[in-house]
Amino acid sequence: MSALQKKLVLGFALVLALQTCLNLALYFSQVHGGHFGGDFVSFWNAARHARQGDIPAIYDVGRWRAFLLSGANDPAPWFVYPPFALFGLWPLGTMTYNHAILAWSLAPLPFYFGLLYLLARRSLRAQMAEAPARAFFVLTFAAALPLLSANLFTGQTGAFVAVFLFGAAYFWNSRPALAGICIGFLAIKPQMGLLLPFALFAAYNFRAILSAAATIVVACAAATAWLGAGIWTDYLHMTQLFGGLIGRGHGGIRQLVVGPYVSLQAAGLPAILAGILQALITLTLLGVIIYFFSRWKVSRSEGNKDDGRMDLRLGLLAAGMLLATPYSLSYDTPLLMLAVVPLLARIWCRGWAAMELAAFSSLIILPFAQPLLLKSHVPFGFLAVALSFWVLLRCYRHEPAKPLAALTR
């Protein structure tokens, strides 16, 4: 990329970062008597119920069924996460709402940016021999801000999910056991992990598989010992109730949705056709992920090596995670930096190609463009993620693998 092109791309990202800060200031100015990060109320209430020993109130299915039947339009602060997620929420139960949301919002950021730096450095070094440019990391962090803001304004789990996925991606080859622990933590949002077991099996990463399975089993056993076995029945009933709401294409989430099923309904497709297309997309993604991860088998002798395309595989996995599930929203998009980094590294080192630049740009403007295009029935979030997946796939197919001996972490 020429010096002028680098300045233009850097300026574009910095403008978006400034826009994010402006949106944050406007958001605070509009919160009068309400709660910043409104969805966080559900996590805070669950933590308080757990602290008080009021376990049945955590998943009060009868209350929420009556709420839905009433036809009320108010936000529903229900808790639909697995019981072991309460271990992470437990410290918040004694805090005021404002202190809890502050801790919740800030806690993942050092890990997020630290792991993002390591992943970006690895991706950039695979593309060029010279030392990474500081401007590249400024650009990377600036590009992350719009995606983080989509999670920050809602008080949701997107930043934590991204941290776990970044950790799994960074340790995937070199420390499979640590990668597995990170993947086990991703079980707090099980629908997001649909592709992960297939990627691990395809890559023969059995140590990560065992580590992830052990993490989940220990977490489930600990939650059962703490909250009682009946908590799982309540949780399953709650997921059924919530799944029925999503299956009907609930209008309240359409401006946030990224997954194909609800996105296609918002664009006007009948639910049955949207369901068929969702199934076809999911099966196609499974095939792609299995094929490309099977090209790279983890072994004891070469577990710390890279063929120069591992970042592309992981980018495909991140984008595919949002497309494979019918329920992924804009607050889940912080993990898309795993797809942005390989695109950005190639743009930075080789100059921009039209499709790579379009995919990069569409991802980082997604939080701004998606609500604006809702009224025109354009599913921008879904289209942006699908475009990035296709461009990453195209990059992988046209980029030759580098000799393993030439690449290290």
Image: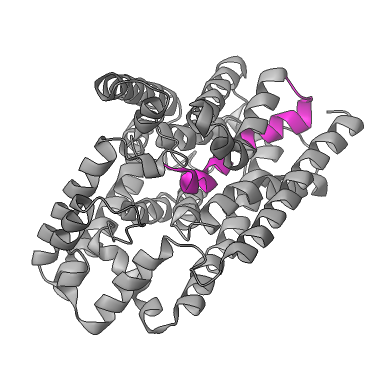
**Observer-nearest residue: 246 or 184?**
246
Q: Position of residue 96 (x, y in %)?
A: 44, 82
Q: At 46% across and 58% down in the image, what residue appears?
A: 160
Q: Is residue 261 left or right of residue 148?
A: left
Q: Can residue 178 be seen at all in this image of the molecule?
A: yes
**Observer-nearest residue: 118 or 174?**
118
Per the image, is 340 magenta? yes
- Quarter of the image where the C terminus is located: top right
Q: At 36% across and 57% down in the image, what residue appears?
A: 75
Q: Position of residue 344 (x, y in %)?
A: 69, 35
Q: Can residue 169 be seen at all in this image of the molecule?
A: no
260 lies above or below 220: above
Q: Position of residue 295 (x, y in %)?
A: 44, 24
* Quadrant of res 70: bottom left
Q: At 70% across and 39% down in the image, what residue appears?
A: 124
The secondary structure that dominates the magenta segment is: helix
| The magenta segment | 329-353
- Quarter of the image where the N terminus is located: top right
Q: Position of residue 161 (x, y in %)?
A: 44, 53
Q: At 32% across and 19% down in the image, what residue appears?
A: 277
66 lies above or below 263: below
Q: Is residue 159 left or right of residue 180?
A: right
Per the image, is 200 magenta? no
Q: Is residue 339 left or right of residue 155?
A: right
